[in-house]
Image (tube, helix red, strand yellow):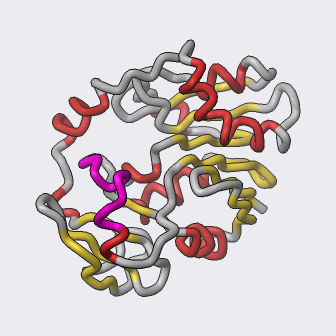
Amino acid sequence: MLCTLCSSVSESFCEDKKRQYFRCTVCDMIFADPQAHLPQDEEKAIYDFHQNDSHDTRYREFLSQLSIPLLEKLSTGMTGLDFGSGPGPTLSLMLEEHGMKMSIYDIFYAPDSGQLSRQYDFVTCSEVVEHFNEPGKAWPQVISLVKPKGYIGVMTWMFTKKTAEQFNQWSYKGDPTHVSFYTPETMQWIAQHFQLKLEIISEQAILFRRD
């Protein structure tokens, strides 16, 4: 099996009742067997159940893990794109409240491809990159949307353990729409491969800076 991110040889890592998982020997990406990916209509049906209320203080607190460190890098009036904004855009509103000029894009809920035809001072991907069926194609697309010296803010739960048994017990992989799982080593590979500067804020918040 070839890695869905870097196309290197990957090894079987573990298996549960629904899917088999592979782990790349080069970039350390863990990914679900592509044959087990959901059809788009079934994938969207799951997203339709997400209750992302922009007024929910707990949801805003969750997103602040990314917004706070990102805002420390930005200046008022900068332009940003919330890539994969979901059915209830909230991070973009939070950033607008701090003076940013935001656009949104989502393949299901805001599919205006015109938003992908220009570059921004920063791009956010909150709980998005784990849904990439083809991360080897999606990451270059996201990076291309950022101006030189711009930032990419990512929220995803990185796998920081080691063993297949620990992975099988990890609740994050239980969502059938989660197909790409990152480790800190994967993030380091992305930074090196795409010539980005990496800052790991926490297990769930990562910043990249494009040179």
Screen quadrant of the C terminus:
bottom right
In the depicted view, which residue is nearer to us: 168 or 192? 168
Q: Quadrant of residue 2?
A: bottom left
Is residue 171 found inside the magenta-colored segment of the image? yes
Q: In this view, which residue lies farthest toward the left?
A: 17
**Rendered position, 12 above or below 183:** below
Question: What is the number of callouts on the image?
Answer: 0
Q: Residue at x 42, y 69 (%)?
A: 5
Q: Residue at x 38, y 25 (%)?
A: 109
Q: In this view, which residue lies farthest toward the top?
A: 55
Residue 161, image x, y percentages: 47, 71
Q: Using residue 39 as the reference point, say whether residue 134 is left or right of it.
A: right
In the depicted view, which residue is nearer to us: 17 or 180? 17
Residue 84, image x, y percentages: 47, 37
Q: Which residues are magenta?
A: 167-176
Q: In this view, which residue lies farthest toward the right?
A: 75
Q: Using residue 167 as the reference point, say whether residue 206 is left or right of it.
A: right
Q: Residue at x 80, y 21 (%)?
A: 99
Q: Quadrant of residue 47?
A: top left
Q: Main secondary structure of the magenta part?
A: helix
**Rendered position, 149 above or below 167:** above
Screen quadrant of the N terminus:
bottom left
Q: Residue at x 41, y 86 (%)?
A: 25
**Rendered position, 198 above or below 144:** below
